[in-house]
Image: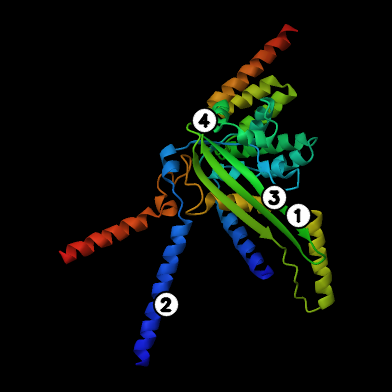
Amino acid sequence: MKKKSFLLLLGVFFLTGCATNNSLYSWGNYESALYKYYKKPDSIEGYIQALEKAILKGESNSNVAPGLYAELGYIYLEQGDMAKAQEYFLKEKSVWPESTYIIDKLIASTSSSTSEGEDK
Amino acid sequence: MMLTQKIKFSVLCLGVFFLASCATTDIEKKDYSKFRAADLKSVLIVPAVNKSIDVDAPDYFLSTAAKPLAERGYYVFPVHLVKRIIEDDGLSDADLVHGADPVILAGLFNADSVLYVSIERWDAKYAVFSTTVTVEFNYVLKSGITGEELWQNTQYLEYTPDSSGNSGNPLADLIASAIVAAIEKAAPSYIPLTQQANGLAVGSKFRGIPAGPYHSLYGLDQADFEGIDEQESEEEQESEEEQVAN
């Protein structure tokens, strides 16, 4: 039984191995970095770096994965860096028109907070 | 006499094989008509409902959820951003999210569809010389426009590291097994198992999710999911036979 399940798993490994070779997008370490961030919420710097790296690689291969720009933009939004948040939100919207509605809402929220900041 | 009996028997076997293969494809076959008609472009993955006792399972699951669906050719809304926005909207509990109207949830993001995942199993059974890690997920995809169910699937996977070494030294094998089991106990391999489960759930033929608009097979994979090519060729054969009979 053990041998069988191991062989099955080995087969699955090979199958998934093939699948990742034909990836549509550059994901970098997005998955493991998000996992680590959930495991240790103070490891947000590692998550940011993983997103930046995955985006850079994706840009050089012109295959940035859907959602990565917006994930990074949202972290900057939470950190109060509205300029960077807007920059990445706009990139998400320009590559993925499906995100237009939510990105417009998010950008509206960043511009209202930046104008508040300028008032002060 | 013997020969004809053998032939009869092998024909019978062949018939049984055909019947058996027909039966399994009939059971496996899903109805993709609603899914195809919806012509989805985007998927909103909401936080998973947890039926395991591991409170961290939903977050860990979420880290693996986007990639397989995006690789099927769909725009997947950024899962962490979605989680935070939904929490800000007052739905911090996944059970509340899953109970909410899919049309309203989808409307928050203008998504075509909503994927609900329920974590059925996420556990590890420890023993001295072996550890078995098990995950099981139930996936339901609903339309963001009508709210109706478009697809559902269940995926079960378990993993027991093969620690039955064959070094020829039984004591060394026993120690090796204990070490492998201890490693698995310290860090159960939920994530690789979950990645595989997600990949199988959405990528398997006849039960996964057909290719979306960003995939090269978009609109060209009916044979892989509905088995339409086979039906067509059968129909062609039948009509040919009718013509011959006429």
- Disc assigned to residue B188: 1
**Residue type indicated by callout 4:** Glu
Task: Identify residue type, mark 3.
Answer: Ile
Residue B134 x %, y %:
69, 56
What whole-number distance in Å separates the C-alpha atoms at marks 3 and 1?
Answer: 8 Å
Residue topped by disc 2: B13
Left or right of B165, for residue B8:
left
The span from disc 4 to disc 1 (Cα, nearest Å) is 37 Å
Q: Quadrant of the C terminus of chain A?
A: top right
**Image depth: mark 4 or mark 1 in front:** 1
Residue that carries the numbered disc 3 in the rendered image: B191
Which label belongs to residue A98?
4
Q: Are marks 4 and 1 in contact (CB under 8 Å)?
A: no
- Given the image, what chain letter belongs to the residue carrying mark 2? B
Chain under label 1?
B
Viewer-side residue, B139 vs B189: B139
**Disc 1 packing (10 Å; few <14; some 14–19; many ≥20):** many
Residue depicted at 76% across the width and 47% down the height:
B54
CA distance for labels 4 and 3: 29 Å
Tell me, yes or no, if residue B238 can be seen here. Answer: yes
> Which chain contains the residue that carries disc 3?
B
